[in-house]
Structure formats: structure tokens, C-alpha cells
Image (spheres, grey):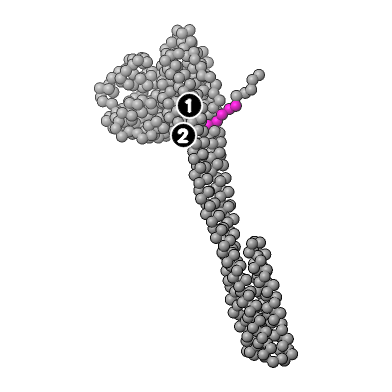
Amino acid sequence: MGKLKKEKSILGQISVLSHRLVLVLVVPIIISLVLMLVYAWKYHSSILRMETITSLKNVVSVQIPGTVWNIVSGRETFAGSNIYVTISSVEETIETISSQTGEENRLSLIVAERTMGTLENYVDRIRDNFEAQLPVVQSEEQLEEVRDVANLVASMLEEYISGEITSTARMSVSMRIIVICTAAFEVLTVIVALIIRNRAVRTTALSVRQPIERLEEAAKSIAGGSLEGRIADTDIAELRNLTTQVNIMADRLKSMMEKSNRDAKSLRKAELRTLQAQINPHFLYNTLDAIVWKAEAGEKDEVIQLTSALSNFFRISLSSGADWIPISQEKKHIEGYLKIQQTRYRDIMSYEIDIPDDLGEIYILKLLLQPLVENALYHGIKIKRGGGKISVSGKKEGDSLLFCVKDTGCGMTKEQLLDLNERMKNGRPTVSEGGGGFGLVNVNLRIRLYYNQADGLEIESSSEGTLVSFRVPLRTREEIYENESVSG
């Protein structure tokens, strides 16, 4: 056995593309941000260190010599001056800044810290002179030494600040180079991302367009009367169900045609089914055209919604060959049809469906409402300037069901309405029948045939729109199966 072909998904391909683009765009941005944050932190730390050392210069060159002078001149005492606290604070600050500084600028701080020890020694000598009650002249000599050492420490601190300024300037140049390189790299990254995106979009569009074109060709072939061709299975997940449903539709149509040829007694019902089935392929390949346009335009959500709606439309149309379906399915059928048509005619058409959910399990003959909605769209709304609205309603009245399809289209003239009523009364629909109203004539005949009643559709029309209504008996699922077994 060969390897199974890997299933593709439109959403999966788009997800992979988006993840790749995010990776290509985000990673360089994160790297550049980290680099800039690191340099900004270093720059800020350097500024703080320079501000701290600048404040120390004033303490060393002015405050400490001034305090020693006050002690020597007798204005202050050692205990009251806190001179040792000041010296200790300066030494601790220099030591802290030194531990935060790189090797290239640390030497000045090391020298300054050692020199502060010398300054402290001179202060100790002055203290010893006072304790020994020596003449002030000897303390004045030590005072001059204190001043000289303080100036030396200040010059070391100044040298450190100059070195930090030079380092910060080099850091600023490096940061500017990083910013320029990052900007250039981001531009290159965006260009690469656009190239990847364009190639991925073309690949995705091609992988989606080809199976849709095959679907369209098969639908046209079916519409032309050829029921032999089948669509090959696709590896696009979202289209596999639709492909299956189209093939099933073709199989059903072929079975119905063969049965109509074998069974002369059921010729009239088979003819009506065949005529009804003629509508779907035309609608199908028109809708597939719209899906192709949406796929090429990159509108993934619209493609998915249209594909799902179309798949549901044909699933209900087929209904496993059943003629009778619950009202909930008929409602879902026209909802799918109107959703598809609104995508194509969103600027000219709006719709409203008012069928209570409590009618959902009641059975009716399938495909009664959709042809009436289609007729309202193509012969009412579409040809009216400015478009209009289609309203579908259903309700229970006693043992009957009343359905109405109303549009605000251009309406019919009295002559057209008279001709249509005449055709519904006496005529039999044919595929080549002109003048519009084919769907109405077909539905009218099906109602009369399957419900075995004289009246079918009732039509009221004016320049403001058209109202088509019909009343049928209320039937449960058990009644339908009982009638079918009796007729069989």
C-alpha cells in the first residue's frame, strides 16, 4: 500500500503562514529591544555614578577641609563635627562606585580611596595634637596637608568623571550604530516576510482554486446533462465534504433518471424531480465562482462560510432521496441558500425568516420554499433599482400550515400575473420555458400532486412587491411513512 496523501486544510495553511510571519517579524524585534534596553541600562547607570561622584567632589574639596579648619580654629570640636563620619561615608561611596565600574575607569577610584586613608591619617594627627595640647601652629601645618590631600582626591574623582564621560560617549556611538543596524535589519525582515507571504498566498490560492475549478467543471457537466463524470477526491479538508455531496448528487440524479426511464407510471414525478435538479448545478457553479473569487482575495472566513453553507444546501437538497423532510431542515435549507446569495448580492438584498422552532418536527414536501425565494430574488429584488428585502414566514393554523414568501421587488403587471396564473393552472413546466415563473409553476404543480389538492400557490403582486403563499395539511412523520407504505 502506498503512503496516504497528507490532508491539507485552508485554516491550517493560513495558520502556518501566520506563525512563520510572526516568528520572522517578532524575533528580530525582541533581540533589538533587548540590546537597546541593555545599553540604556548601562548608560543610565553611568550617569548615576557620575552624579554621585560629582556630589562627592564638593564634600572632599570643600566640606572636609572646612570642617578641619573649624576644628583647628576652635569653632568646632572633634565630637561635634562628625568629621570621621563624613570621611567614612566618602570612602564607602567610593568603594561602592568602584565595584560597579569597569576596569578601564576603576584605577582613579582605587587611588582616590587610598588617598582618603592618607587624609584620615592627617586628621588623626590633628586630633593627637589637640589631645596633647600642642600649639595650634603645628595643627595648622597638618591642616595644609589635609587641604592638599583633599584636592588630590578631588582631582582623582574628576579624572574618573572624565573617563566615564568618554566611556558613555563610546556607548552612545555604539547604541546609535545598533539602532541604525536594527532599523536596516527590520526593513530587510519586512521585505523577506512580504516575499514569504506572497509565495504562501499564491501556493494556498492555487491549492484551493484547483479543486474548486474541478468542482465547477463537474457542476457544469451535470448542468449540461452528463451524469457520468465524478470528481476526484481532494486533499483540502474543507472541500472534501462538498466534493462528496456533489458526487452523491450526481449519483442521485443518475438514479432518478434511470428510474424515470424504467417506471412509466412514475414519469410525472420523476420529470418534476429532474426539472428541480436542473436548478442546482447552475446555482452550484455560480457559487463556486464566488468561492474562487473569495479564495483568490484571501478572504478565508468567507470561503469557509460559503463552503459550509453550500455543503449543507446540497445535503438537505438530497436528503438521502427522501421527498419529505422536517420543517427545521427546510428552514435550514433556505437559510443556507439566502446566506450564499447575500454574499453575492449583499449590496441589494436583505432577508428575514420567521418560522417558529416549535414547527421544526412537522414534515413537509422538501424544496417548496427555496424556489419561491429564488424567484423573489431573480425576478423581484435583482432587477429593481436599489434592491429590496425578502421575508419568509410560516405558522400553524388549525390542521394546516401557512407559508408566505414576500419581497419588496419590482412586482408584476396585471398581464404578467394573469399569464402566470394561467400557466400554473394548465401548464406543465419545461426546462426551456421562458418568461420567468418556472420555479413558481413547478412548486405549484408539486403541491397539487403530492398533497392531492386543487389549490397550490396564491400570488398577489403590485409595483411595491410580490407575496406568494400556500397552505398545506399538517402531517407528522408517522403519517408520511404510513402513506408511503400504502402507496408502495
- Residue type marked 1: Arg
Residue 9 belongs to the span the image colors magenta: yes
- Residue type marked 2: Gly
Whole-percent x and y of residue 152? 63, 75
Q: Which residues are magenta?
A: 6-10
Residue 472 in sight from this viewpoint: no
Mark 1–mark 2 Cα distance, whole angstroms, equals 12 Å
Q: Which of the 4 quarters of the picture holds residue 396?
A: top left
Q: Main secondary structure of the magenta part?
A: loop
- Mark 1 and mark 2 lie on one chain; the one further toward the N terminus is 1
Q: Nearer the viewer, residue 303 or 125?
A: 125
State the count of labels: 2
Residue 445 in the image: above or below residue 53: above
Tag of residue 209: 1
Name the residue located 32 percent from the left edge and 33 percent from the top edge: 387
Residue 73 belongs to the span the image colors magenta: no
